[in-house]
């Protein structure tokens, strides 16, 4: 249960309501993270710009970005974000089986270059100070420096989301097919 009273559409107007409705259309339901961000409209607006800039544009395919988000979230034990981005992975590429494997850190469905990025995400999430030049050199076998920046930015983004969700006590919505059965 959330530590805050989360916003509902009936509580909102203007741009904040519009952003919530866009999220509902994209996901098929209104996520608790969206309902939390709606409590601070300026934060919600900034988060929308940040997410679109990082996740919906750039060098890397959306599939890889969602896989990175899932790996970071699983590594951080953030069930909310792991489930949300396994669903986003499914929406982006249509393969629920691959998303489920990603959620269990079974990276066998991924290409060698994708695995390099996902293993880098897992290592840097577990211990960012462990990253060495050799790790970057391994990524360079598959990615440009700009793509490495993008990979690292997705990792950064989801480290922050994992913390936010945990701090706010947000729970994964029952509508999400990746919700844990207790």
Image: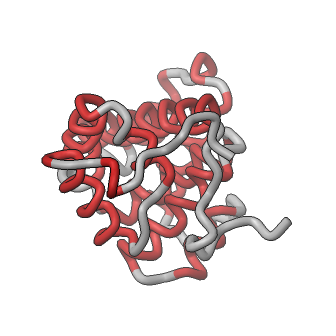
Q: Which quarter shows the C terminus?
A: bottom right
Is residue 123 in sight in this rendering? no
Q: Residue at x 29, y 55 (%)?
A: 20
Quadrant of residue 127 within the rendered picture: top right
Is residue 45 in sight in this rendering? yes
As displayed, is residue 23 above or below residue 135? below
As displayed, is residue 131 above or below residue 171? above
As displayed, is residue 68 above or below residue 159? below
Can you give x and y, in whole percent of width and height, for residue 3 in the image?
Answer: 64, 35
Can you give x and y, in whole percent of width and height, for residue 15 in the image?
Answer: 15, 46
Can you give x and y, in whole percent of width and height, for residue 80 in the image?
Answer: 61, 52
As displayed, is residue 113 above or below residue 97? above
Quadrant of residue 148 within the rendered picture: top left
Left/right of residue 48 with respect to residue 125 in the rendered view? left
Q: Residue at x 60, y 81 (%)?
A: 97
Can you give x and y, in whole percent of width and height, for residue 96 in the image?
Answer: 55, 80
Q: Residue at x 27, y 48 (%)?
A: 12
């Amino acid at each position: 249960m959330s530590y805050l009273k989360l916003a509902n559409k009936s509580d909102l107007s203007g741009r904040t309501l519009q952003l919530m409705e866009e999220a509902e259309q994209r996901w098929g339901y209104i996520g608790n993270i969206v309902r939390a961000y709606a409590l601070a409209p300026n934060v919600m607006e900034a988060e929308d710009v940040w997410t679109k800039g990082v996740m919906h544009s750039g060098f890397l395919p959306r599939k890889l970005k969602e896989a990175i988000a899932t790996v970071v979230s699983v590594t951080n034990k953030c069930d909310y974000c792991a489930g949300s981005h396994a669903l986003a992975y499914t929406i982006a590429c249509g393969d629920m089986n691959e998303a489920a494997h990603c959620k269990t850190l079974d990276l066998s469905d991924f290409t060698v270059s994708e695995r390099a990025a996902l293993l880098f995400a897992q290592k840097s999430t577990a211990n960012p100070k462990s990253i060495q030049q050799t790790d970057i050199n391994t990524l360079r076998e598959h990615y440009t420096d700009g793509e490495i920046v993008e990979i690292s930015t997705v990792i950064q983004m989801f480290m922050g989301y994992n913390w936010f969700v945990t701090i706010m006590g947000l729970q994964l919505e029952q509508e999400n097919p990746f919700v844990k059965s207790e």
